[in-house]
Amino acid sequence: MKRFEENSTNRLFEKSLIDREQMDQISEYRALNVFSVHTELKLFLYLSVLLFTSGIGILIYENIDSIGHIAILSLLLIVTIICYYFSFKNAVGFKKQQTSFENPLFDYLILAAILLSCIFIGYLQFQYTAFGTHYGLATLIPTVIALFCAYYFDNKSILSIAITGLAAYIGLSVSPQALLDNNFQQSDSLSYSAIALGIVLIVWSIYSTKIELKKHFNLVFLTFALHLINISCINNLFEPYWGVFIILLAVSSYYFYTVSYSIKSVSLFVFTILYAYFGLNFLLFKIIDLIDIQDLMILFSFLVPFYFIASIILFIRLIKKFNKNKTDDCTR
Amino acid sequence: MIAHDKTELENITLLEEAKSLNEAGFINKKQFEVISKQLIVPKSHNNLLIRAAFFLLGVFLYSSICGFFSLISVDLIDDNFKVLIFLYALVGFIGAEFLTKQKFYGHGLDDAFILGAQLTLAIAIGVYTDGNGLLIAVTIMVTSLLSYLRYVHLSMALLFCLAATASLVYTMFELGDIGKNILPFVLMLFSVAVYFYSKTVLKNLKTAFYHKGILLANSFSLILFYLSGNYLVVRELSVALLGAQINPNSDISFAYFFYAFTFIVPVGFLVYSLLKKDRIMLWIGALAMAFSIYSVRYYYAVLPIETFLTIAGLLLFAFTFFAIKKLKHNKTGITFRPDRFTNANAFMNAEALIASQLGLKPETIQESDMEFGGGGFSGGGSGGEF
């Protein structure tokens, strides 16, 4: 593996695309023979947190009547507090810019703390109905904690938990699995609130750009907003009043198209295009359906390959234009 | 044999190298831009998302062309509709050749045609021979090898590995019960042969074009070797293929061998990969270890799942904690310091996505037992890797 990379470096040098000094630096570093298990160990930490919290979650759920509640609660509380204690002790404190722990271990410790607090509050509500019939509170409190921690510790995973919490508060399940299962609640009022939440997220991202508050979080906010708004719109296309939503879809597509240019995010760009393409095809289908001439159907089926070729050319153009705007092709 | 321009293919590897040098901070962004302007490369997409989107479009285009042909020829051949499937495969190959001439390489569109051609060819042969597995596998083995040599697509190398294995398996089936009985051992021998052969080829390889494909065959042989001796796989397959009845007190033949194999091989992979600093083998070893634990738990669930998960989480955490502590300050060799050459950006984004899967679920307002707000429980799903 290494041999070919060194070869490529040599070739770059031969073509005088890199100079002698850089070449020496590179071979010096390669000679160190570094084998970093940084990513692997971080993945293990993440996995251990997921395993532990799911284990605890199931454990409590299964034994909800059998073990002493107080014992469980106090044990859970102690573990949670320990996690919080160490995280706060080692935190760099709140800053407006991107920050990180000196040791990435604590990123995962605080994630564990958040997940455990969710379980703790859920348990309180279930067993003692601590929040009475204000079911919303039981979702809102973990959400607020998660939001605070996401900003304080600068953690994107926790931020996305907080956003799912916000969505849950208005009654939506926005986990990727739910979206894949097409489990996205279909009722009208819910899709309106989903669109509203999406708009709130957009407004917040604009505001935080203005006051320069954790600008790298914007991608997370905008990703959630994009999918919330566009999926709700597409769901509503199959209702009688689809006209309003196709306009809304067009507006949001235009907005996210410009935003993806300004924050240079490929994933936003591609998904925006895909949603817009779906909307466009839907509109075309509606128009053909409206014309409704049997004889034309055969003509249409002959035109389909050319339609696809035209759209492929269009996509290639769009992506070329986008790639000119940014120089590196990183995944984000 | 290679359909692409060789200098342009080489430029791709050079550009990749320049990119990783840029990310490692050896050259600055400006220099990288200069380099990327000077190197002419085929039309391709490094970004998997864009490539997948174009793949989807390519599939649409391919199927609409096939539909177009079916429409015009539907009156000509009403009985011989089977011929049409061969025509579809032909369309795929012509499309692949055309796109390659247009300098598409790893773009998404060409992937759709190259993969689609193989798939329709397999279906066509299946339809003609009433699903003769051996014939399908052998044909695909040949066509995918030729396509790999011609188009240098990694997916073709993978397809070749799979088809070659499938051909071997079907040949063993032809031998009857004896073949089925010795299947695990034959597969082990096969993968050992592939492993050492690909390793020597890698050592003597002059040009970089086929490097990745052979590396893939090498990794594939590791996975195949492990799976062919894994207790769970062997036991379930012997039930499925031989119709073996396994009573509660009995076990499959050579059971102890397979038990030992299930654990010794992953440990061997892990130790060897750390000694040889082989990252791919390290990953395969870790995944194999996880699958081994799952295999044993599948038959002997000593601990209930929740206790198992909790303890496994704690143990894994403790192990990682001490590993980090020990490796934190190493400057050479195995270390916890991030390598300047590996880029963990994609992993961090995936993490946020998985975390949102764990997130909170809306409360059901109905009067039921399930009015539970805490989201931690939904995490059970992600424990499925074990």
Image (tube, grey):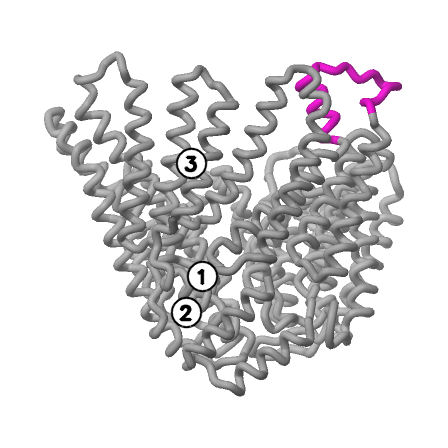
Left or right: A183 as drawn, with respect to A149: left
Instruction: Give coordinates of residue B146: x percent, y percent.
Output: 42, 41
Q: Spatial distance from mark 2 to mark 1, Cα to Cα?
A: 10 Å
Residue B329 falls left or right of residue A159: right
**Does the magenta-highlighted stretch encompass residue A32?**
no
Whole-percent x, y for residue B350 in the image: 57, 56
User: Looking at numbered disc 1 in the image, what kind of residue is underneath it?
Assistant: Leu
Count numbered badges in the picture: 3
What residue do we see at 31% from left, 50% from top?
B100
The secondary structure type at the circle numbered 3 is helix
Kind of residue indicated by mark 2: Ile
User: Is residue A228 in sight in this rendering?
Assistant: yes
Label 2 Cα neighbours within 10 Å, binned few <14 / some 14-19 / many ≥20: some
Which residue in the protein does label 1 denote?
A: A222
- The residues colored magenta run B232-253
Subunit of label 3? B
Q: Are marks 2 and 1 in contact (CB under 8 Å)?
A: yes
Instruction: Say whether mark 2 and mark 3 are on the same chain.
Output: no
Q: Position of residue B70 (x, y in %)?
A: 23, 25
The answer to which quarter of the image holds residue B123 is top left
**Would you name the residue on which mark 2 appears?**
A263
Q: Which residue is mark 3?
A: B143
The residue closer to the viewer here, B246 or A17, is A17
- The residues tagged by marks 3 and 1 sit, at their Cα atoms, a distance apart of 45 Å
- Decide whether residue B247 is among the magenta residues: yes
